[in-house]
Amino acid sequence: MKRSSVKELLHSNKFLQEVHVKGWVRTFRSNRFIALNDGSTINNIQCVVDFENTNEELLKRITTSAAVSITGTLIESEGKGQTVEIKVTKLEILGDSNPDEYPIQPKKHSLEFLRENAHLRIRTNTFSAVMRVRSALSFAVHKYFQENGFNYVNTPIITGSDAEGAGEMFHVTNFDANKAPVNEEGNIDYTQDFFGKETNLTVSGQLEAETYAMALGKVYTFGPTFRAENSNTTRHLAEFWMIEPEVAFNDLDANMDLSEDFIKSVLGYVLENCKDDLAFLDNRLTQEEKSKPQAQRSDMSLLEKLNFVVNNNFKRVSYTEAIDILRNSKPNKKKKFQFPVNEWGVDLQSEHERYLVEKHFKCPVILFDYPATIKAFYMRLNDDGKTVRAMDVLFPGIGEMVGGSQREERLDVLKTKMAELNIEEEELWWYLDTRKFGTAVHSGFGLGFERLVLFTTGMGNIRDVIPFPRTPQNAEF
Amino acid sequence: MKRSSVKELLHSNKFLQEVHVKGWVRTFRSNRFIALNDGSTINNIQCVVDFENTNEELLKRITTSAAVSITGTLIESEGKGQTVEIKVTKLEILGDSNPDEYPIQPKKHSLEFLRENAHLRIRTNTFSAVMRVRSALSFAVHKYFQENGFNYVNTPIITGSDAEGAGEMFHVTNFDANKAPVNEEGNIDYTQDFFGKETNLTVSGQLEAETYAMALGKVYTFGPTFRAENSNTTRHLAEFWMIEPEVAFNDLDANMDLSEDFIKSVLGYVLENCKDDLAFLDNRLTQEEKSKPQAQRSDMSLLEKLNFVVNNNFKRVSYTEAIDILRNSKPNKKKKFQFPVNEWGVDLQSEHERYLVEKHFKCPVILFDYPATIKAFYMRLNDDGKTVRAMDVLFPGIGEMVGGSQREERLDVLKTKMAELNIEEEELWWYLDTRKFGTAVHSGFGLGFERLVLFTTGMGNIRDVIPFPRTPQNAEF
């Protein structure tokens, strides 16, 4: 008999018909009611066992997380909380789950404990909801770009370039530790390594994506990137997924438009397609907020926040305006900032970004035209000679969601900048070629996917929105 | 004035209206006709310059790959090969391209030469077509799974496990070469490395995906995987993208159904959505075939091959049947195989797979139920005790496109197998947990994405279907 998913059955009205379903027991109460889940939805289907006519040994094996096969009659439920249920006629245990050994019991576990059981935490409501939303968000990303004429580009993960400039890199090698061959000059002989040169894990696909944008027009990457930085925070991972669109002929204004339209579109997609999971996560966050002091609670629920972002314009503010606002702000005057804002040119700290977004504007903010000295070499210099066409999209509770810029398209200006920063032209000969042959204005940005998932799900730690997080001292599973 | 894409204009009938377009010059002939491309389509739009009233210095700068901005009137074309063209009223050079220096001239270059210029080869018709098809195929993959209730799972790239069993691994480390700290016993002290243990680049996300399938039901991965193998062939890459669906409650038959339905669906998507690019690639392959001796030419054109796969059933053949066919085949009897097929149990070589697919069945073939001794530890043992529920999908010209299996769901059988192969239980404690707590029949497969792109585009070398290929001694760009 054909198997139905729990999701199908919950939306079915084939009452009094025989149905067949397989899944895992979430709870079994009163020796009678199985809450069965198969991952197709956060909701369980209630399966009612005729316990008086069921073997006692079999009943004992209906434990949390046991895999079962159930055949029965779909009926309208008289109980609270569900509209349909299955009157079980046949029940088979496919795989037992010994309750004395199974680590995840039907009670509240700490997120830290669940992280240590990342292979099993997906069996909880919270993590199954988070990961289904993550999956839907991924698809929304591809859908948005594909429907808007972008081509997906897989830029290399192993890179021979160390000039990407976005952070510390992991080494990739085929040499055994401390057994790398040495040449006559006493240096490591990388010509004998797998790729014949030193290689690292990429920190960004931007530079390669630019070469593709200068031919295909609109491109995007969506792949893993890496940072070998010892950041043990709730916002950093050593391995994370990044989305990097790059568009020929777009200036910074068009780039800001793209980032805003993109974020609104993908959030709109999950609001439409993940209603049950978001309702659960909304409720979860509301419960969690209740344990906080009143002053620290959010004004908005998760769903309100998501709808607010979709329905309101992001505030666009130049770095210079932002500095003025911060300089004259209460916390600055009262010396409440750890890093006081006194002069134009300083890099903004998390506390400043949070003040702007959470206290001053109370909405996502796009800061633009940053001082050249605090930004990357490839960003386009403004006519003032001191600012570059950079932009950061800042989100409440998250901080930097997007970092982007119009790229320096002028070969001479780019070369001068690289010389100032001691970036060798030979390292990036192919990148310079894009400015040599048919250069044009172009722009792009990078969005850390896990930060988007964090915002969308209302989770508090980035380690809880990726299946198997990689962080300092942690590469389990 | 709003910019239009070349694709939009070619499908527009806004004749006599003013239009604006930006792109790169593909060719400029008779001092008058610019073939302009912006990457939105393989087709160029013809822009007709009023050369008698145009500055001669400006005309000289209209060279291959120069970036230009054009405003003009859209008119019906009288020329051959296009229906619309632009009568140019304003032309601006955005970025020059010195024809004496630009490496890619409008003539036929060798694929090898273009590989060395991977940052510029995307500006050719062939590579832009290949990469647009690759992008569309990627989207078709996500679309298929998402519409069929699968959840996308990002399994880790950096792995602490070396038991994935699919091939040689690259090391990932934060230690400088030959400067790794050593502990008191004289061994490398990996507790001081970034992750506190030895780490490698993943060869497969399957084992982690299985843990997710046992909660979400249907999942798939689509991400980069790595092989540190010195294979310098037209079918191997050190870094490639792999698609790995995994489905709870699916047996091997359902797994075969899924692989066949999936491949047909994604090929159907590109046949529908990449008509212009596939027509170009079809013609390209036909031209290339003409240079081959008659006997080596394919019976079918590229489009015929793609349609053939979409419209015909894959042939399902057990390993045992395949051995019988091979043993009694002409090439085996005439000793034409390099590896003669004499007895049951031998591993099939590429020459055998090609005989079965290209000569005997002349269609994609799914081989199943292989000898246990030549397959991985996690494959389900059949009742005969000597074969496992493995399957390989073999494609003409490509060989193995898919490798998959029903997984061994029985804890005791799996443990016995691991012990036989000296795989430590402590290494895979989390994997064993899936068999311990609510185990169930499940199956999945891996499909090398570049092999699918290779088949779909009719290209001959896998290095030509990924933007920046990584192979032994090569990690440029």
Image (tube, coloured by chain):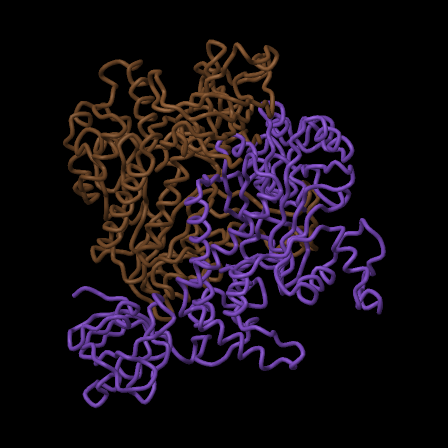
Chain colours: A brown, B purple
Q: Which of the pair A146/B386 is nearer the observer?
A: B386
Q: Is residue A213 visible?
A: yes
Q: Quadrant of residue B388?
A: top right
Q: Quadrant of residue B429?
A: top right
Q: Is residue A200 visible?
A: no
Q: Which of the pair A277/B363 is nearer the observer?
A: B363
Q: Is residue B397 left or right of residue B119?
A: right
Q: How many marks?
A: 0
Q: Residue at x 58, y 68 (%)?
A: B460
Q: Which residue is outermost to the front?
A: A16
User: Looking at the figure, which quarter contains the N terminus of chain B?
Assistant: bottom left
Q: Which of the pair A422/B456 is nearer the observer?
A: B456
Q: Is residue B459 above or below residue A233?
A: below
Q: Is residue B259 left or right of residue A419?
A: right
Q: Is residue A183 above or below residue A356?
A: below
Q: Is residue A15 above or below residue A378?
A: above
Q: Is residue A52 above or below residue A443?
A: above
Q: Quadrant of residue B386?
A: top right
Q: Please state the horizontal and vertical placement of residue A320, each as a whole percent of the image.
A: 19, 43
Q: Please state the horizontal and vertical placement of residue B441, each as a whole percent of the image.
A: 61, 33
Q: Please state the horizontal and vertical placement of residue B463, each as a whole percent of the image.
A: 56, 62
Q: Which of the pair A447/B57 is nearer the observer?
A: A447
Q: Please state the horizontal and vertical placement of residue A326, each as a whole percent of the image.
A: 19, 33
